[in-house]
Image (cartoon, coloured by chain):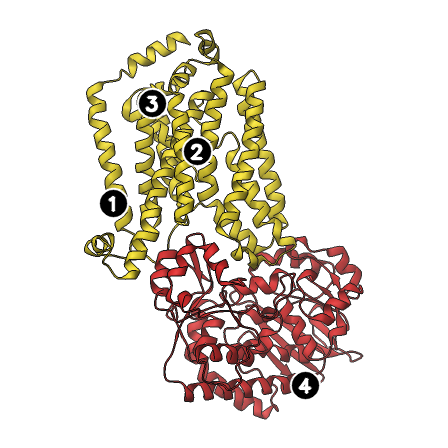
Amino acid sequence: MKTEYLTLTATFQPSRTRHRLIFPGLILLVLIFFILDILLGSVSLEVSEVITALSGTADTGVETIIMKFRIPKAITATVVGIALSLSGLQMQTLFRNPMAGPYVLGISSGASLGVAFIVLGLSANISPDSLKGLGNWSLVAASWAGAGVIMIVMLFLASRVKDILTVLIIGIMLSGGISAIVSIMQYFSHETMLKAYVIWTMGSLGNLTASQLNVLLLSVSAGIILSLLSVKMLNALLLGENYAGSIGLNIRFSRIIIFTGTSILAGSITAFCGPIGFIGIAVPHIARILFRTSDHKILIPGTILTGSAVMLLSDIISQMPGSDNVLPVNSITALMGIPIVIWVIMRNRKYSGIF
Amino acid sequence: MNSHPVIHASYRYLSTMCLSSLLMILMSCSARNETKRNNSDLQENNGVFYAERFTLVRNDGYSKLTITDPWQGAEDVTQVWYLIRRGSVAPPGIDPQNILFVPLQKIICMSSTHLSMIKALDEEHTITGVSGAGFLYDRTLIYRFEKGLVKDVGYDDNLNKELIVNISPDLVMVYGVGSESLGYIGKIKELGIKVLYNADYLETDPLGRAEWIKLFGALYCKEELAEEIFYSIVEEYNELKDYITKNTNIKPTVLLGLPFKDTWFISPGNSYISRMISDAGGDYLWIDTRSSVSIPFGIENVFIKALDADYWLNIGSVNRKDEISAIDLRLEALPCFKNGNLYNNNKRSNSKGANDYWESGSLKPQIILKDIASILHPDLFSDTELFYYRKLD
C-alpha cells in the first residue's frame, strides 16, 4: 500500500503553478455562476432591473423576486454544493471507495424515513390535502430527526466495529432496510401524498426562509470546521486504517470526527433541500482531476469551490431560464454528475489506485 | 370519503380532458347542444346536454348507457351498458356482461361525489361499501358506517377484494385517474362483479358534472326525479350567471392553490374551477393555459403574476392566515394576502378532514357559483352568508 501511495504521488505530482491558476479560476467561475443564478430564472428580468432591485429602488415585485427568491436560492445552492461535495470527499477517503458519497452512511435514507412518516404516515388519519398546511419547519424537523437517528447508530457502530468495510456494508444494508420501510409506506399511501413525497425526494433549493438559511449556514459552517480539522487524519487514512494507526492516528477518534462532520453536512442539506444526488460523488472526482493530487490540504478547498460551481450551474439549468416551468434540481445534478463519473473512470484507469 | 374527494381537490378539477378533445368540444359546443336539444325534444328530454362523457338513450324496455373516455388520457375508449328492469328479459344479442339490472339494490362507491348523487335520489340505503370511510362527511352515511351497514373496501391497489366479493354488490362504481387503475379494476371484474366507470370529475362544465345525476336516475329507475333535480340546478345556475353578468362591471383577478416547495401546481384555464370563476364574474390569472392536468410552475413565476391577484381562493386545506405564512413567508408579500382577501372552500369540513365541497359540491354548482360571486363581488347579493367557502383570518 505504501508503494502504491508513492507511485501515486509521482503521477499526481502537485504543481504549485497549476494550483495558482486553478484556484483563482474556480473562484471566478463561482462568482460568475452566482451572478448568473441571480440574473436568470423563470421570470425574465433585465440586468438593469436586477441592479435597481439590489439598490432597493425597484418596484416591489422585482425586488421580492431578487431579494426573497433568487439571492437566498443562490446562497443555498452554493452551500449545498460545498456541503455535499465535502462530505462526499471525506467518505471516499474514509472508506477508500470511489463510489462512496455523503449518503453511504444512510443519512438520506434516515431523512427520507422521517419525511415519509410525516407525509405518508399522516394519510391514514388526515386528509391528504392537509399536507399543504404543514409548516415549513415540520418537514425539516422530521428529516433532521431521521438523519440524526441514523447518525447515532452509525457512530456507535463506527466506534465498535474494527473493519471500516464492515461499517460501509452495514450502512448500505441499513439504507436498504429503511428504503423498504418507506416503500411499504408509499404502497399504503394516497396518490396526493405520494406525489408530495416524490416531489420532496426530487430536491429543492428555493424554499428556505431567512431564518432557515441562517440555521443551514451555521450547521454547514460547523461541518466545514470539522472537515478542516480532519485534514491530517484524512491524508493518513488515504493509506488505509492499518497504516494510519501505525503512524499514531487514533482511528476511533478520527472516524467519529469525520462521521460527525459528514452527518452534519449531509443531514442539514437533506433536511432543508431534500436528498440531492450525485454532487457528493462526482465533485470530489472533478477536484482530484483538476488539481491532480490526493492531498486534502488542496482537495478540501478545491472541492468546496468545484462543488459550489457545479451546484450553481445545476440550479441555473433547473430554472430553465425563459420558461415558465422549473425542473427538479435533483434530475439536473444526476444528469450532470453521471457523465462526469463515467468520464473520470474511463479516462483515468490509474486513478482508481488512490483507493 | 378519503382521499378521493381530496384527490379530486387537487387533481380532479385540474385533471380534465385532453387538450385536443377540449378544443374540439369548444368549437362544436354550441352547435352540438343545439342538435342534442332538438333531438331530445322528440325523445321527451331523455338526452344529455352538458356532460361530454356519457350518453343515455331510452329504448323500448331498456336504456343504453355509453361512457366515453372515462379516465384521464383515455382515447377512444367506449363502455356500453344496457340497463334492464329487474324481472324483464334482456333483448337478444346483448352480452350479459354489459347488462345491469335496475334499480340497483347494492352499490359500492369509490368516490364521494357518487354518494351525494345517490343521496339526492333518496337511495342512500343501497350504498353498502365506500372507499375510505374515514373521509365521509355526510352524517347519515357516517352513522350507517358505524352501524356496520356500510363497509370500507379500501382503495386502489389496497382494495379489499374479498370484502367486495362478500358484499356481492350489483355494481362497483369507480373513477379512473389513469389507465393504471385498470389493474385493480380488472381483478374485480374477473370476480364477476360489474364495474362502471364514472367520469364526472373529468367534466369541465360545472353543469356537465352535475348532469351525471341522470346516470344515477337511470340506475335507480328514478329518471324523472333526476331530471327534475338537474333542471332546477340548470335553471338556478343560469339565472345566477345572467344576474352576475348583468350586475358586474369589473372582473377581480383570482389566484388558486398553494405552492409545494418551489413548485406551484396551477389549475389550467380549461379546468372546472377556472370555468366557475369566469361564470362568477372573475378573471382567473391563468385563464390562457391549457392542459389536462395541473401545470407545474416555478414559484417565482407564479409569485410575480400573483402580485396582481385581488383574491386568493381554494388554498389547500389551510384554516388560518398564519398557516400560509408557515408554508412560505414570502407569500405574505402578496397584496391579496395583505388585504385579507383569502377564502378557502373548507367551511364544511369535519375533524377527520372530510370536506363537503368535494362530497356534495359537484351536485351544487349553483351554490359554489354564488359563493365565489359573493366573494368577488361583495355587493352583489343581499344575503352574503357563504356555504362552502369561508374567509381566512
The answer to which of B231 and B370 lies nearer the viewer is B370
Quick one: SS at disc 3? Answer: loop
Residue that mark 2 sits on: A265
Q: Determine if marks 2 and 4 fall on one subunit.
A: no
Marks 3 and 1, how far apart in space? 33 Å
Give the answer, above or below, for where B146 lies relative to B232: above
Quick one: SS at disc 2? Answer: helix
Marks 2 and 4, how far apart in space? 66 Å
In this structure image, what is the colour of chain B? red
Q: Position of residue B264 (x, y in %)?
A: 43, 58
Lateral position of residue B124 relative to residue B254, left or right:
right
Q: Earlier in the sequence, mark 2 or mark 1?
A: 1
Residues at marks 2 and 1 touching, judged by CB atoms closer than 8 Å: no
Q: Which mark is residue A348?
A: 3
Give the answer, above or below, for where A47 lies relative to B193: above
Q: Earlier in the sequence, mark 3 or mark 1?
A: 1
Q: Position of residue B41 (x, y in %)?
A: 57, 92
Quick one: SS at disc 4? Answer: helix
Residue that mark 1 sits on: A35
The answer to which of A150 and A99 lies nearer the viewer is A150
Q: Chain of mark 1?
A: A
Residue at 46% x, 60% y is B258
Q: Nearer the viewer, mark 2 or mark 3?
A: 2
Query: Type of residue at label 3?
Result: Asn
Residues at marks 3 and 1 touching, judged by CB atoms closer than 8 Å: no
